[in-house]
Amino acid sequence: MSDENQILIPESFLDLHRDRSRTRLRTPVAQVRERYELCEDLSQQLVAQAQHIHFDLGVSEDEVLVRIEQGLAQPESGFSEDEARWVTRRLAELLMWD
């Protein structure tokens, strides 16, 4: 999906904001785009931190991802549980840990 800003929002992220029938968004497109940009940027920024935790501290890939998701799922993070899960999965893709 795209809008006037030409930002392609992946289906996996759009699904977070769709109704149960998966046909319509429950959230305005502009807000979905804003949340997507935030989540994508965070995923990119977490790459170096995740690599440090894994390689320098010797924590397994799975444990690194679990810890990051748990942190993001906290109410004070500003992310929903679904967004926390999406960010973590995207991070795993970027790190080629999946």
Image (tube, helix red, strand yellow):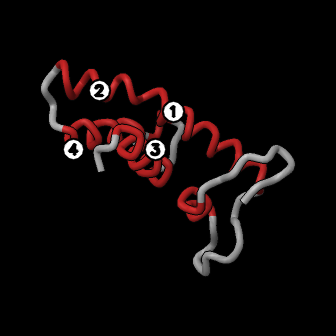
- What residue does disc 2 label? 51
Disc 2 versus disc 1: distance between alpha carbons? 14 Å
Amino acid type, label 4:
Asp
- Going from N to C along the chain, the mark reached first, 4 or 1, is 1
- The amino acid pointed to by label 3 is Val
Q: Are marks 3 and 4 in contact (CB under 8 Å)?
A: no
Q: Secondary structure at mark 1?
A: helix
Q: Residues within 10 Å of mark 2 (few under 14, many from 20)?
A: some
Tell me which numbered mark, 4 or 2, is placed earlier along the sequence: 2
Task: Name the element at disc 4.
Answer: helix
Q: Residue 52's x, y, as percent?
A: 27, 21
Inter-mark Cα distance, 4 to 1: 18 Å
Q: Are marks 3 and 1 in contact (CB under 8 Å)?
A: yes
Residue at which label 4 appears: 62
* Of the image marks 2 and 1, the number of the one nearer the N terminus: 1
- Please identify, in this view, whether the residue under mark 2 or under mark 1 is nearer the observer: 2
- According to the picture, the residue beneath numbered tag 3 turns out to be 87
| Residue at far left of view | 58
Mark 2 or mark 3, which has the lower sequence index? 2
Distance from the alpha carbon under mark 3 to that under mark 1: 7 Å
Q: Amino acid at mark 1?
A: Leu
| Residue in view at x 73 percent, y 46 percent | 7
Identify which residue is drawn at 19% across, 24% down: 55
Q: Position of residue 90 (x, y in %)?
A: 44, 46
**Mark 2: amino acid:** Gln
Direction bottom: furthest residue: 21
Residue 43: x percent and y percent? 47, 36
